[in-house]
Amino acid sequence: MKNFLLEQQQKSDRIGILTEFIHSHPEARELKRAIAVKMVLQGEPYSQITKLVGMNKSCITNWKQRFEAEGIDGIKLGYKGAKSYLTTEQHTEIIRWLREKEYCNIDELVNHLDENYGVIYQSKQSYYDLLSSARISWKKSQKINPNFNPDLVKIKREEIINFLTQNQTEIESGHLVVFFVDECHLLANDVCGYVWGKTDIRIEIAIKNIKDKQTYFGALDYKTQEFIVHEYPTGNSSSTVNFIKYLQNQRPGKRIALIWDGASYHRSDEVKKFLSSVNDHHQPEQWQITCIRFAPNAPEQNPVEDVWLQTKNFLRKYWHLCKSFSLVKWLFKFFTNHQEFDFPKLHQYEPCSDLK
């Protein structure tokens, strides 16, 4: 009877210690361990505990044993108890878990092993070995917009091709000039990129102010493939109107069609007012300025994006010439303005292009 009462008192004391620790706002992983062990001591079924805290039974048992042997220190991060290891069965489980994932990082793997198996390796190489066994290698992630709509992209592409087809005679004669338009916000550190260099020497580029930036509006002539660039303080409605006027000066007496994205300043009241004044008293088929939008959330539709990319790659290749941001801007315009660019992306809008 005395032994039973003693055991009950010890259990009560341990639950009290865990409760106090839980209320001290420990780190998230320590909190999960403490909650799991406390629930075990309170007699909660393992099925309920594993569902609540996301640990398997063997891991919960492991943390309970560590707590009973070492107290709170046994469940804290950085525990220095017995050497960590995975059984053959656990190793197989980890590899299966990794292969089921589309991607993983070291921190996620560390947390998974710690929380589910109570294993913390001394060296990161052990984690790298697990990733290698699962045939997971280091890759650069690619951005994708979850709002991207491929069906809408196809519809807009057909709309653009139909416009070009219907106006092909006017385009060929030069009476209608079609421009693909986009903006680029050049930053001082855009010249930084990958170069080959000695492994023991750091490659440094002198940039006095990484906040230096310059906005460029660019227009790619659909017929001649000439690229026209002009710089502005920022991308806004005023700059948009001024760039349209600049294009009119570049193609005097010509009707112009602008194919661009749905940026807010492309659709602003100021731009609409300007277009209304230019197109006043004209039927739509004779508008001086016609605007066609790409599908939203799909910048890859615009061939001008390739011009910007090629130009920035040029700057990175010749980074050693970029002694100042003014020189960076000069090189940017030197590489783009009134140059001809021919990208496969441009040809997808040709009237004979395959729409499938």
Image (tube, rainbow, N blue to C red):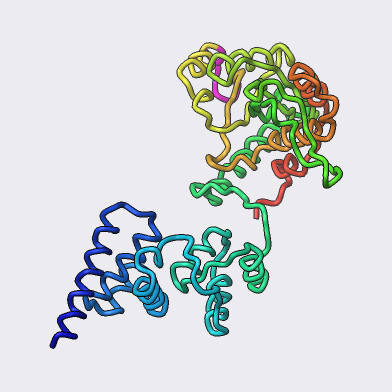
Q: Residue furthest left?
A: 1
Q: Residue visible at 46% across and 71% down?
A: 118
Q: Is residue 178 visible?
A: no
Residue closest to the eye, 156 or 188? 188
**Above or below 279: residue 45:** below
Image quarter hosting the C terminus: bottom right
Q: Residue furthest front?
A: 2
What count of labels does the image hold?
0
306 in the magenta segment: no
Q: Is residue 128 visible?
A: yes
Q: Quadrant of residue 157?
A: top right
Q: Quadrant of residue 135?
A: bottom right
Q: Image check: 90 left or right of 346?
A: left
Q: Image check: 198 left or right of 260?
A: right
Q: Position of residue 59 (x, y in %)?
A: 42, 75
Magenta region, residue range: 278-286
281 in the magenta segment: yes
Residue closest to the eye, 206 or 273? 206
Q: Position of residue 297 (x, y in %)?
A: 54, 41
Q: Residue furthest bottom?
A: 1
Image quarter hosting the N terminus: bottom left
Q: Residue visible at 77% across and 44% down?
A: 344
Q: Residue visible at 78% across and 42% down?
A: 194
Q: Image check: 202 left or right of 52?
A: right
**Above or below 249: residue 221:** below
Q: Residue visible at 62% across and 23% down?
A: 211
